[in-house]
Image (cartoon, rainbow, N blue to C red):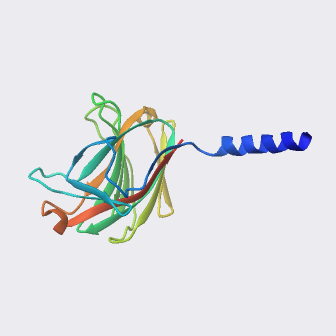
Amino acid sequence: MRLLAAILFAVVQISAAEPAVLLQESFKEDLSKDWFWGLGTWRAENGVLRGFESGARRHGPVKMRKLPLKDATVECEFRLEGKATFAGVIFNGSQERGHLVHLVMSRDQLRILAHPKKGETKELLKTPAKLAVGEWHQVKLVFKGPTMSATIDGQTISAENDCIAEEKLTFGLGGDSGGPEGEKAGALEFRGLKITQ
């Protein structure tokens, strides 16, 4: 009986230690309706979400998804293709609140931008990096209260601001894909998206 109790206790302990998966995207089929808005052209196939600038509006591609979270871990891989200069992950509050925090991963630097108030942008961190075009790069974001840390290909950066602790209702994947010539100029690719709490 004691052995059974010990085994059950161990199973409960292991289960409690495993983070809950909030989202895991395979990108092997069309995006769900939770991906609700975007700029540019996006398609999910063969395990990759690919986006590039298109249309008359001069703005890099971005694709938004609904997912309320506070403290969480976000993991994915990204790749810059052609003339693409950076990939980013942005987190927003309500539509009235707007942007909260933004991780920008460019060919030569990493940046964390905070948005303490609607319409206000504050650069919390900027550091050199080397991200090769055409190669997959790993990123892991960890939110804990007012702190966000990000590890990109083993390089860890961190920043703190009160707005980071606010509830994040949506997030977006995007960046600069190389210009208005569309897919001929370049593209951004993402895969292996997983969010845990």
- 52 left or right of 131? left
Q: Residue at x 34, y 42 (%)?
A: 65
Query: Image quadrant for the N terminus?
Result: top right
Name the foreground residue: 1 vs 175. Answer: 1
Name the foreground residue: 131 vs 15. Answer: 15
Say if residue 143 shows up in the picture: no
Pinpoint residue 110: horizontal percent, then vertical percent. Answer: 38, 57
Which of the 4 quarters of the picture holds residue 80?
A: bottom left
Query: Image quadrant for the C terminus?
Result: top right
Q: Residue furthest top?
A: 96
- 4 left or right of 122? right
Pinpoint residue 132: horizontal percent, then vertical percent. Answer: 36, 71
Q: Residue furthest right?
A: 1
Q: Is residue 34 above or below residue 136?
A: above
Q: Residue at x 43, y 32 (%)?
A: 167
Name the foreground residue: 58 vs 37. Answer: 37
Say if residue 65 shows up in the picture: yes
Name the foreground residue: 57 vs 130. Answer: 57
Q: Is residue 59 above or below residue 169?
A: below
Q: Residue at x 28, y 36 (%)?
A: 120
Q: How many marks?
A: 0
Pinpoint residue 129: horizontal percent, then vertical percent. Answer: 40, 64
Which of the 4 quarters of the picture holds residue 124?
A: top left
Pinpoint residue 44: horizontal percent, then vertical percent. Answer: 31, 57
Which of the 4 quarters of the picture holds residue 108?
A: bottom left
